[in-house]
Amino acid sequence: MHDFQFVDGEFFCEGVAIDTVSAKVGTPFYLYSYATLCRHLQVFDSAFADIPHLTAFAVKSNSNLAVLKLVANHGFGADIVSGGELYRAIQAGIDPNKIVFAGVGKNAGEIEYALEIGIRMFNVESGEELRAINTVAVRMGKRASVALRVNPDVDPMTHPYIATGLKKSKFGIDSQFALDSFEAATHLSAIDVVGVHMHIGSQLTKVSPFLDAVKRILRLMENLQKRGINLSYINIGGGLGISYADETPPHPNDLAEALMPLLRDLKVRLILEPGRVIVGNAGILVTKVLYTKNGDGKHFVIVDAAMNDLLRPSLYEAYHEIVPVRQEKRDSMIVDVVGPICESGDFLAKDRELPEVKSGELLAVMSAGAYGFTMASNYNTRPRVPEVMVRDRDICVIRERESYADLVRGEVIPDFLQ
Ligand code: LLP
């Protein structure tokens, strides 16, 4: 994260001190580096330059319009999972022809919206969904391009909550039914079967699960060919991990190199759906220490950000490095960094060695650009925090802090309660 670094003991994002942003927007806030985002987009896309491909950014990892516009400016498409994400992608100017729509539970309204916009394809996860898409398309007089998402039953060796390609997972079509599902799809009147999709999990730190899964998909494609079904796309999903602590995930170049021998001679276009690897280390969450206190053999650092702002530690026991934004010589201690929410599960770090911190000082929660703001909620009626993008010395608020009025927008007290 070299766009986030200390200069004379003070933490900077590009040319801007974190303190300066805090003085402008208050705390907590998410902060993204424009330069890091651009670099990650370029590095990822150029890794696959030798293979005909479409890179569809996973909108669920970070859906701010400014981030999506940057993604669009780099020629990326979008991997979406809801009507709301489709709306965002279109608002940000992402080419509909580069949008792929995944998810196990698309509803009729979302299917209609996607057909109206004219997205590239649906990644279909069940036979019933396939028939639902066909029904909507027939009614609208349109054709729907689809890829079938196949569950390759490969262990991605990641956290069970973010593993998606195992037999027991709800995602995709079980590989034993795959051939028949493809066959059935070709008989639907408004469906064009154009591809196969897989996504085995997130935060993968090894290449081998990708390779195992792709090999299985390629065997399936051979069998499909024997039945006269020729596909134009193979979509290998997202999932490439990042370094939160001491993980050493493969570089996109390593993944591309490993895949090259498998894909080189195929006459199909590759689709990729990276999320975390693009945005994860391009963003931080900045929070202020409110209080410190000692419990029975415990030290607590109570900060103004909570599990509603960054859910990953509570939900996955995920590790995010935490650093005081002012570097000074001081002792360290083992602390729990906790938020103001009324839940014991509300923590950003547990039993963490941190320099002794004081109330009022700022902490940076690192690697928070992916699945940070997008998983935020209003729990405890806490306004969602602002998002800020820094470009060199420019500070741009790309999402304002919510107001109390925002929090009750749309709520109604019925007449009979007046
Ligand atoms: N494609 C599909 C179909 C997906 O389901 C996902 C992520 C991606 C692409 C992008 O995966 P990535 O490149 O970001 O690993 N909230 C969790 C992560 C959930 C990922 C869900 N699917 C977390 O905070 O770790």
Image (tube, rainbow, N blue to C red):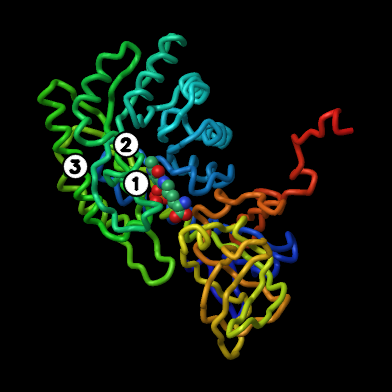
Quarter residue 343 falls in: bottom right
Quick one: SS at disc 1? Answer: loop
> Along the horizontal axis of the image, is 275 left or right of 381?
left
- Which is closer to the viewer, label 3 or label 1? 1
Q: Which residue is mark 3?
A: 263
Q: Viewer-proximal residue, 201 or 271?
A: 201
Q: CA distance from mark 2 to mark 1?
A: 9 Å
Q: Earlier in the sequence, mark 2 or mark 1?
A: 1
Quarter residue 267 falls in: top left
Q: Viewer-proximal residue, 331 or 50?
A: 331
244 shown above or below 130: below
> Along the horizontal axis of the image, is 15 left or right of 120?
right
Identify residue type, mark 2.
Gly
Is the C-beta of the residue carrying label 1 under 8 Å from the nearest atom of ligand 1?
Answer: yes
Quick one: SS at disc 3? Answer: helix
Q: Viewer-proximal residue, 239 or 77?
A: 239
Q: Which residue is mark 2?
A: 172
Is disc 2 in contact with disc 1, using a CB cutoff of under 8 Å? yes
Identify residue type, mark 1.
Thr
Q: Could you tell me residue 340's position as x and y percent? A: 68, 64
Q: Viewer-proximal residue, 279 or 164?
A: 164
Q: Earlier in the sequence, mark 3 or mark 2?
A: 2
Q: Which residue is mark 1?
A: 164
Identify residue type, mark 3.
Leu
x 57%, y 79%: residue: 335
